[in-house]
Image (spheres, rainbow, N blue to C red):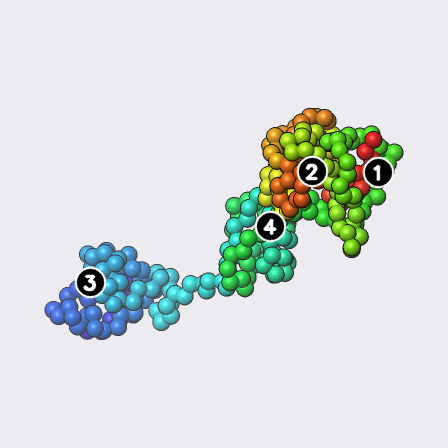
Amino acid sequence: MEFVMGDPPLRRIRRALSLKNPKSLITRSFVPGRGYCDKSISRAMAFTVATLLGTMFLAIGCASSPSRPVVGKPRPAGVYHTVKRHQTLWRISKTYQVDMAEVARVNGIRDVNKIQAGQKILIPGAKKVLHVDIYIEDLGPSGQKQAKVDLVKVKGRFMWPVEGPIMKKFGLNRARKHAGIDISAPRGTSIKAAGSGKVIYSGNEIKGYGNIIIIKHGPIFTSVYAHNNVNLVLEGDSVMKGQIIARVGETGRATGSHLHFELRNHNKPFDPLLVLP
């Protein structure tokens, strides 16, 4: 029996059902024409799609050409990275050693600063999913050069977060990169907010800092409190100058109990001793 490609799909299927020897049907090649799909064939022949596919019919998409099977889009080479809180596209791309512009292009990302936690991003060429660390620089505009500070405007705005001798001073030169000051204090000593503001981070996901709190003081300044034994405020909390926000500890990369304290101007660190009373 021959199938005429001009026949309406259901008529051709019914003609197939009139065969006296069903085996002759399943040993032949059957190429459906335009208008066929696996469900329409199975309805006409009174069995399920699974049975249809199991009897060696070549089921082609209903809108396909008669001689060319449907070929889906090839799976892109790479892995999908699920964005976590406070991760940036720049840091993700750097971790995977892939150009950020290319990652943005293949994912249709127009603004590289606007990715959301839970979003899945294709990393082209990657072989496996990697852990992406979070850095303080990821929470705002980056910068490792000492910022110029208007001392007249800033002097007296911030207070000492804890009392004690300075273990390590500020320095961003090549031989000694230290973005803040380390203040020695017994474990459990109260840490106070250096100024009023809003907590933009409270956790322990920033590499090397242990339990850390970051407070935003208006549109320009942020303060950082690290290696805490325990954080007493949550992200999103509003705090007042002098309010107790944490306890001194030695979590993260720390030697001895102390507070690592930073002040930042547009996220660029500067020496706190220039503005502390």
Residue at image point 35% right, 69% down? 66
Query: What is the x, y in percent for residue 153?
Result: 85, 33
3 or 2: mark nearer the eye: 2
Q: How far apart are marks 3 and 2 (CA)?
A: 85 Å
User: Which badge, 3 or 1, comes first in the chain's sequence?
Assistant: 3
2 or 4: mark nearer the eye: 2
Q: Is mark 1 on a helix, strand or loop?
A: helix
Name the side, left or right, on which 75 lies relative to 62: right
Q: Name the residue under label 1.
A: 274
Q: Name the residue under label 4.
A: 133
Residue type, mark 2 in image: His
Front residue of 43 and 245: 245
Q: How far apart are marks 3 and 4 (CA)?
A: 63 Å
Q: Mark 3 points at which residue?
A: 14
Q: Name the residue under label 2.
A: 258
Q: How far apart are marks 3 and 1 (CA)?
A: 90 Å
> Can residue 258 be seen in this snapshot?
yes
Q: Residues within 10 Å of mark 4 (few under 14, many from 20)?
A: some
Contact (CB < 8 A) between labels 2 and 4?
no
User: Which badge, 2 or 4, comes first in the chain's sequence?
Assistant: 4
